[in-house]
Image: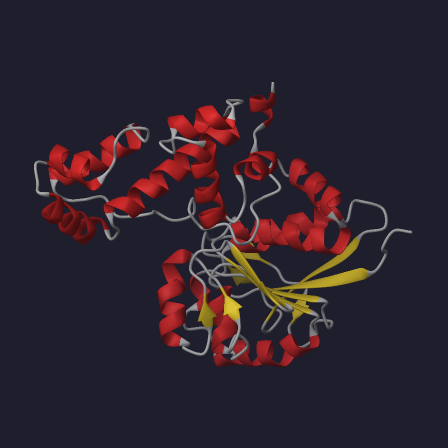
């Protein structure tokens, strides 16, 4: 018999909230509730029950104040500019509500609000890549993981920026009701059943800065266009007309990463796109992406994305690439 347990999802609203952090997960839970036997009771609440203005200027009308909101199964705190310098009354209410919820969730910089409320101490968490350093610096008791798109630690679930909130919501639906329902919701929303949580925030953040000096910038562009070429430091240094030692030092200083790490990211991204968008075989993709062999590509995928190329393709392949 289908699980008919109703799960109340309470989404916290505040001035400066990111509207996509609110609507994305809510659309996932709402879509799941269209299935017989599945019920998510979606609620929204602000501190005083009054309307709030999102970062894009959209006015959101909550269903109640936080004081009058029901005890939720899932308490979801979105991100946005309003998470910085939020009123102490808001973090105080979160501190009161959170222990009553079976599941505590943050999207993007909503983790900053939970951290300020002392609800993340001792836990593994993530947030938008641009705020991981701040979260770790300002709240040293929090164990910040910079790479994953979302992190589960017991009843706590935190996600990276914006669209990762949809990934996390789909994962929660899958946890509650199984993969088939989560996949149906993803199809309805015209998104993929997204990445496993331990996949890196690779596409959500730049892997490095663009070099200022022309020779180094040209090498970056050349690597991107030729992932299957000889991309050892000696070869790249020759293209930049620098000694290998000088090149490696200058490349890291200007881009924030080593030449080897940059090449790894480019090759991985190239292979990911081919797996998603083409029907090419794994061996051909491995050669085209500079790995040489399928086994070398598999090791790179498992190391960085915690999934093999075949499983990655199964999750993210576009419909057009199957025809």
Task: Report the residue at 40% width, 57% height from top.
Answer: 129
Q: Is residue 106 visible?
A: no
Task: Report the residue at 18% width, 44% height from top.
Answer: 211
Q: Is residue 103 above or below residue 313?
A: below
Q: Nearer the viewer, residue 128 or 17?
A: 128
Locate residue 289: give its quadrant: top left
Q: Position of residue 197 (x, y in %)?
A: 55, 53
Q: Is residue 300 left or right of residue 171?
A: left
Task: Report the residue at 65% width, 48% height from top.
Answer: 27
Q: Nearer the viewer, residue 129 or 57?
A: 129
Q: Position of residue 299 (x, y in %)?
A: 46, 43
Q: Position of residue 218 (x, y in %)?
A: 18, 34
Q: Is residue 21 left or right of residue 304?
A: right
Q: Residue furthest right?
A: 1
Q: Is residue 292 left or right of residue 212?
A: right
Q: Position of residue 264 (x, y in %)?
A: 34, 42
Task: Report the residue at 53% width, 51% height from top.
Answer: 164
Locate residue 78: give its quadrant: bottom right
Q: Is residue 225 left or right of residue 86?
A: left
Q: Is residue 299 visible?
A: yes
């Amino acid at each position: 018999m289908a699980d008919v347990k109703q799960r109340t999802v309470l989404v916290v609203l505040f001035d400066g909230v990111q509207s996509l952090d609110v609507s994305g997960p809510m659309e996932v839970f709402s879509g799941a509730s269209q299935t017989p036997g599945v019920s998510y009771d979606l609620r929204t609440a602000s501190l005083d029950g009054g309307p709030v203005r999102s970062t894009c200027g959209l006015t959101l009308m909550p269903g109640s104040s936080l004081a009058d909101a029901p005890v939720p199964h899932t308490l979801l705190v979105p991100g946005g500019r309003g998470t910085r310098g939020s009123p102490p009354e808001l973090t105080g209410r979160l501190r009161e509500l959170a222990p009553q919820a079976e599941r505590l969730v943050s999207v993007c910089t909503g983790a900053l609000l939970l951290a300020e409320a002392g609800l993340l101490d001792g836990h593994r968490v993530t947030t938008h890549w641009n705020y991981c350093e701040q979260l770790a610096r300002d709240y040293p008791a929090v164990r910040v993981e910079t790479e994953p798109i979302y992190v589960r630690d017991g009843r706590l679930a935190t996600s990276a920026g914006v669209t990762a909130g949809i990934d996390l919501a789909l994962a929660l639906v899958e946890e509650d009701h199984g993969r088939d329902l989560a996949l149906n919701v993803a199809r309805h929303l015209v998104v993929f059943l997204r990445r496993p949580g331990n996949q890196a925030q690779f596409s959500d953040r730049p892997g490095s800065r663009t070099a200022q000096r022309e020779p180094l910038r040209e090498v970056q562009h050349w690597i991107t266009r030729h992932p299957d070429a000889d991309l050892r430091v000696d070869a790249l240094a020759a293209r930049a007309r620098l000694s290998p030692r000088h090149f490696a030092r200058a490349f890291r200083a200007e881009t924030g990463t080593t030449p080897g790490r940059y090449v790894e990211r480019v090759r991985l991204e190239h292979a990911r796109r081919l797996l998603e968008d083409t029907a090419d075989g794994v061996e051909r993709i491995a050669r085209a992406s500079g790995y040489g062999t399928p086994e070398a590509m598999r090791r790179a995928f498992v190391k960085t994305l915690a999934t093999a190329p075949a499983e990655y393709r199964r999750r993210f392949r576009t419909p057009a690439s199957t025809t």
